[in-house]
Amino acid sequence: MGPFPLIWIWIILIVNLVIAVLNLVMGPSLSSDIHLPTNLLYCLTVLELLVCVSAAALLKFKAWGMWGYTIIGLIILIINISYHWWTLTSLIVYLVGLVVLYWSLNVGGENKAWKYLK
C-alpha cells in the first residue's frame, strides 16, 4: 500500500476519534447547542468509534473495513439529514471522504492497495 491511502486512513481514524472524544466530553452542552437528543449524540459517538474500527481494519488490509466505513458513514449521514443537522455539509463530507478513500485504494497501477485487501 502506498503512502497516500495510509495517510488518508490515518486521517479518517484520528478525525473520527477526536469527534468521538469531543462528543463524550462535551455531551450535554453540545447536545443542547446542536439540538440533538443526548442519547442520539452518544449513539453517533458509538458510530464514530465503529468508523475508527473500520479504519483500523483497513490498516490491517481487511476488505470489510471499507464496507464498514461505507455503511456506518451512510447511517451517520441519514441521522444527520433526518435531524436537519449540517445536511449539505454532512453529504459533501461523506461523499468526498468515500470517493477519496476508494480512489486512494485503487490508485497505483500494479501497487494499488485494493488488491491487497482480504
Image: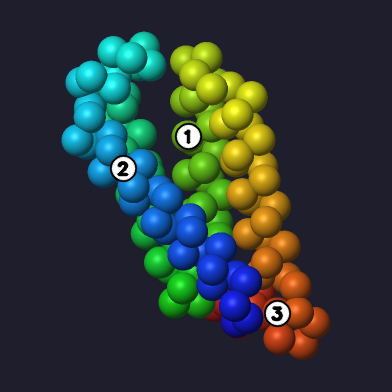
Q: Please, what secondary structure does the residue beneath circle 3 have?
A: loop
Q: Which residue is mark 1?
A: 76
In the image: residue 40, left or right of residue 97 = left
The label number, if any, that marks residue 112 in the structure image: 3
Residue projecting furthest to the right = 109
- Residue 31 tag number: none
Secondary structure, mark 1, is helix
- In the rendered image, is residue 67 in sight? yes
Q: Residues within 10 Å of mark 3 (few under 14, many from 20)?
A: some
Mark toward the start of the polypeptide (3 vs 1): 1
Nearest to N terminus: mark 3 or mark 2: 2
Q: Residue 19, relative to residue 81: is it above or below?
A: below
Instruction: Give the labeled residue for mark 2.
Output: 20
Residue 40, horizontal then vertical, whole percent = 31, 24
Q: Residue at x 80, y 82 (%)?
A: 109
Horizontal and vertical percent position of residue 31: 29, 19
Residue at the spot x=52%, y=14% of the render? 84
Classify the position of the N terminus by image quarter: bottom right
Residue 46 in the image: above or below residue 5: above
- Residue under the image location 67 percent in, 46 percent down: 96
